[in-house]
Image (cartoon, rainbow, N blue to C red):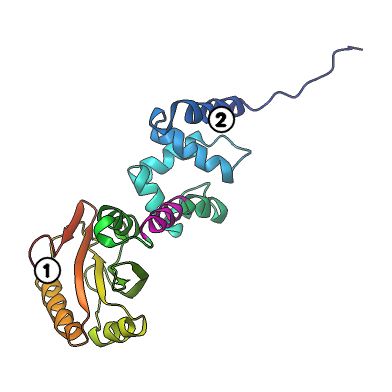
Amino acid sequence: MSNTMDTKEKPHYVGHRERLGEKLLVRGDDSLADYELLELILMMALPRIDVKPLAKTLLARFKNFAGVLNASPEELMSVKGIKETTAATLKIIPAACVRMTKVEIIDTPVFNSWSKIQDYCFLKLAHKKNERFHILFLNIKLHLIADEEHQHGTVNHTPVYPREILSRALALNASSLILVHNHPSGDSKPSEGDIKITDELRKILKMSDISIYDHLIIGRQGIYSFRRHGLL
């Protein structure tokens, strides 16, 4: 009988994960390829399997890293190997980014945090697959009171109800608003309808001494500001 005690070898991916973790901590996230960073996220939900093939499959399916994180839970779960827990883990990342960015703009006047406000709106809406109309309500000091979704619609249209917006602004004691909506097509240029509804809202709100600070249209390629282009 052998006196040598059998030892159970660690799975080959364990050492790989340890090296990836060390690489991230020592050299920073720029040192990691997209599939490697995705591996580190996936291994939190799937600690007992080699997730490198799955990471590469997801990147091929959704084109790039942002495409993976912005895919819907249903789209993610259509990929073999992705179940609800793993999809939820992937969705934590964009949710955390939006929350972190929102914290940075609360209690700060918009003119001191304008680039962060645009970053926040872009993170929240740029990759949505249907139109969503959000309103940032501001107090008299131009501090953010609330960010609320007014409506969501189809891939190219969202109904907007000016009287409801006025009523909500009065309820929050808002002095000005930032209107924000996305164009799922990716093109952030305003349509004639966008310009018309903005003008209609401006006139209705003005009767109650409420102004529109800006109207931002979010596209995947950038942001269109009505204020910057002289439309407000």
* Quadrant, the N terminus: top right
Looking at the rendering, the stretch of residues picked out in magenta corresponds to 93-105
Q: Secondary structure at mark 2?
A: helix
Placement of 200 over or under 81, stated as above or below: below
Residue placed under numbered mark 1 in the picture: 191
Classified by dominant secondary structure, the portion drawn in magenta counts as: helix
- The structure residue drawn at horizontal position 61% and vertical position 40%, both measured from the top left corner, is 47
- The structure residue drawn at horizontal position 39% and vertical position 58%, both measured from the top left corner, is 102
Q: Residue 208: image x %, image y %? A: 22, 86
Other-residue count near label 1 (Cα within 10 Å), few / some / many at <14 / 14–19 / ≥20: few
Amino acid under disc 2:
Arg
Quarter of the image holding residue 150?
bottom left
Amino acid under disc 1:
Ser
Q: Nearer the viewer, residue 22 or 228?
A: 228
Q: Residue 141: image x %, image y %? A: 29, 69
Q: Which mark is residue 17?
A: 2
Placement of 54 over or under 166, stated as above or below: above
